[in-house]
Amino acid sequence: MNTAIAWVLGVATILGGIAAIFYFRDRWKDRNRFTEEDKEVTSAWWEASDLRKDYEAKGFRSFGWSNSDRVAERQAEGAEVIYLIDDTRKVKFRVVNRSGQMLIGRKGT
């Protein structure tokens, strides 16, 4: 009888541990998930920003503004959307101008 109780308690402990792992894994994913928002900037801000220097250091050479309905097409051509990351708030800001155009960049060769 003691052996059966030990087996039941052992299995229950293992199943409880597995359930806890899945529970905390999902919470960890939610905690690390970034939301996306728009940040309106001017061309003068972009030209003088540290963000531009950071992207240039990553190999980006060409930057331009694109209408939001054409961004998918530009990405298919090799362009990438420029993001300003706020790690403390877990927000990725899309850089946009007053007209609603998004800033995209291309890596140079």
Image (cartoon, grey):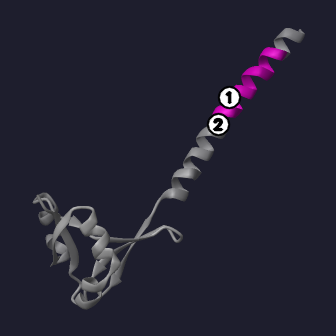
Residue 18 spot, x, y in % from top left? 64, 32
Specify whether residue 63 is painted magenta. no
Q: Looking at the figure, which quarter contains the C terminus?
A: bottom left
Q: In this view, does 64 lie above or below 31?
A: below
Q: In this view, does 30 lie to the left or right of 52?
A: right
Mark 1 neighbour class, 10 Å CA radius: few under 14, some 14 to 19, many 20 or more = few
Q: Is residue 74 left or right of residue 30?
A: left
Residue 70 spot, x, y in % from top left? 13, 71
Helix, strand or loop at mark 1 = helix
Q: Is residue 37 above or below residue 76?
A: below
Extreme residue in the right direction = 2
Q: Nearer the viewer, residue 6 or 47?
A: 47
Q: What stretch is highlighted in magenta?
A: 6-18
How many numbered circles does the render carry?
2
Q: Measuring 78% from the left and 15% from the top, which residue is drawn there?
A: 7
Residue 19 spot, x, y in % from top left? 64, 36
Q: Looking at the figure, which quarter contains the N terminus?
A: top right
Q: Is residue 79 left or right of residue 44?
A: left
Find disc 2 in the rendering and name its residue. Answer: 19
Q: Pointers 1 and 2 in contact (CB under 8 A)?
A: yes
* Three-letter amino acid code at the position of disc 2: Ala
Q: Measuring 20% from the left and 75% from the top, which residue is drawn there?
A: 68
Find disc 1 in the rendering and name its residue. Answer: 15
Q: How far apart are marks 1 and 2 (CA)?
A: 6 Å
Helix, strand or loop at mark 2 = helix
Q: Is residue 42 left or right of residue 34?
A: left
